Amino acid sequence: MKGYIYTAGSFVTVNRSICGQKGSWIDNDPHFWTGPPTWGICRNDLRANVDPDDMIFFVLPLNGRHPQCMFAYLTIERVITHHVAYHDPLLRSKRMGNKHPNGNIIVTAAGD
């Protein structure tokens, strides 16, 4: 088992809300706002090196509204491709289509 610390640079708060609701945007990667939690869409370098049971600890950036601190962690269950993620029925809510993003699986304008 390995552990990683990831500074979630786009997060500025730990106030939980659905992405983009009421002007309090919370980033979508890592994405905790619908289950199951997911992470790693833009970090191919880390995704290539992690294994199941490794842990990722998420830290707020220095410019956040809260003191820089660990705000979440995940234990990796599996590492999958975007293609596999798109077709996984458990991850359907994570698709980012032509909508206000509330997930982290990238799709085309046609929803593919």
Image (cartoon, helix red, strand yellow):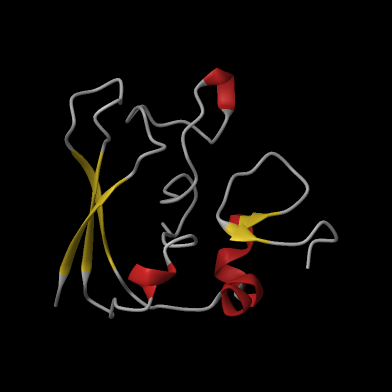
- Residue 23 place in picture, x, y as percent: 56, 19
Q: What residue do we see at 64% from left, 43% from top?
A: 101
Q: Quadrant of residue 68?
A: top left
Q: Name the residue located 49 percent from the left edge and 62 percent from the top edge.
A: 41
Residue 40 relative to residue 60: left or right: right
The residue closer to the viewer here, 31 or 43, is: 43
The relative height of residue 18 versus residue 21 in the rendered view (above or below) is below
Considering every residue shown, the one lying at the far right of the view is: 110
Q: Position of residue 75 (x, y in %)?
A: 25, 66
Q: Quadrant of the C terminus?
A: bottom right
The residue sitting at 30% across, 25% down in the picture is 63
Q: 7 or 69, which lies in front?
A: 7
Residue 18: percent from left, percent from top = 52, 35
Total marks in image: 0
Indicate whether 6 appears above or below 99.
below
Front residue of this view, candidates 25 and 35:
25
Locate residue 58, reporting x and y percent. Answer: 25, 48
Q: Quadrant of the N terminus?
A: bottom left
Q: Can you tell which quarter of the image residue 90 is in?
A: bottom right
User: Does residue 92 appear left or right of residue 109 in this picture?
Assistant: left
Horizontal side of 59 relative to 78 (left or right) equals left
Residue located at (45% from left, 50% from top): 29
Q: Is residue 68 above or below residue 1?
A: above
